[in-house]
Image (tube, rainbow, N blue to C red):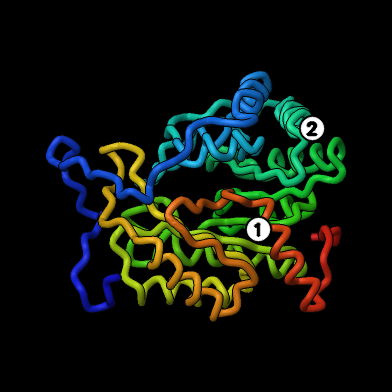
Amino acid sequence: MPTAGESVPRPSVISPPESRPQRRLPLWLKRPLPAGEFNRTKQTVADSGLATVCQEARCPNLTECWSARTATFMVLGDRCTRRCRFCAVATARPDPPANDEPVRLARAVARLGLRHVVITAVARDDLPDEGAGHFARCVEQIHQTSTQATVEVLPADFHARTQCIAALCRAGPDIYNHNIETVERLTPAVRPQGKYHRSLAVLRIVKQIAPDMLTKSGLMVGLGETEDELRQTFEDLRETGCDVLTIGQYLAPSPKHAPVARFYRPQEFEKLARIAEGLGFLSVASGPFVRSSYNAAQMFERTGEKRVAAGVPAGRWTGTA
């Protein structure tokens, strides 16, 4: 793993796609074929008319997750107002939010029998509340129709506007996830419309509004970061009170996206997990195919068990934001 003093490729200067050699994936970056409930999940998603980040972001875990009857739903449309160099979601003028989307989402969750629901959204900088109110209605509708299901939200940063974050917190998600994505040095190149410290502020504001609500964040590795930079990012996240961390390998969705600087080996992910656990995260998932919502149900349950064991109150936050 590179150290702070080593020279590493930086995605801020990206060569034209035609000049880049195709990189062969290592053996540990292979995924299973569809099995189990894959077709049922695929049909349920299609019938709902909903977008999923599994499809829109070309997630490498789609076959595994859909075969296990899990999916990460994406609300507020499938066109984003931001253009991140790592993301496959289309950037374009979005349509107005669909008024019936919360109901369609809740029906799909009930049909799949999900016990843990992950909802993400495109950035909606075009809306006065950046989509926070619509996102909250989606959470509320799921609570009404699937009372035993826990809900994890993964929204954009809302420009760290307290009133937007509070609106989503009031809907009562069980875990609030917002990804930092990469280290501070690489953020301007990888997330040109995002800000490293603004993402930290989001997680800090959630804890100020709802101290008992679990917070979660995630990073990609392989963009040219150093181990020292990753450690600093872990420390910055812990300073906000962040409870759960995911670390996964960045895979370029296409030649037009930021290139992969290198592929981390499984043992390197294990080392990063030990570093993060030593800083006090309740749960850490670190591996080549780990993504924000990968095995989210199991991770949420494991984190809840650790909270209970530590004497921390568990259960949905229902305070007034």
Can you say whether 116 is above or below 235 in the image?
Answer: above
Between tags 2 and 1, which lies in front? 1
For label 1, the residue is 299
Residue closest to the eye, 80 or 217: 217
Left or right side of 56 for 242: right
Residue 135: x and y in percent read 69, 41
> Which is more toward the observer, 302 or 260?
302
Q: How many marks?
A: 2
Q: Nearer the viewer, residue 233 or 30?
A: 30
Element type at marker 1?
helix
Residue at screen point 28% across, 62% down: 224
The amino acid marked with disc number 2 is Ala
Figure quadrant of the C terminus: bottom right
Q: Which residue is rendered at x = 16% and y = 45% of the image? A: 15
Whichever of labels 2 and 1 marks the residue nearer the N terminus, that label is: 2
Where residue 201 appears, as percent x and y from the top left, is 57, 66
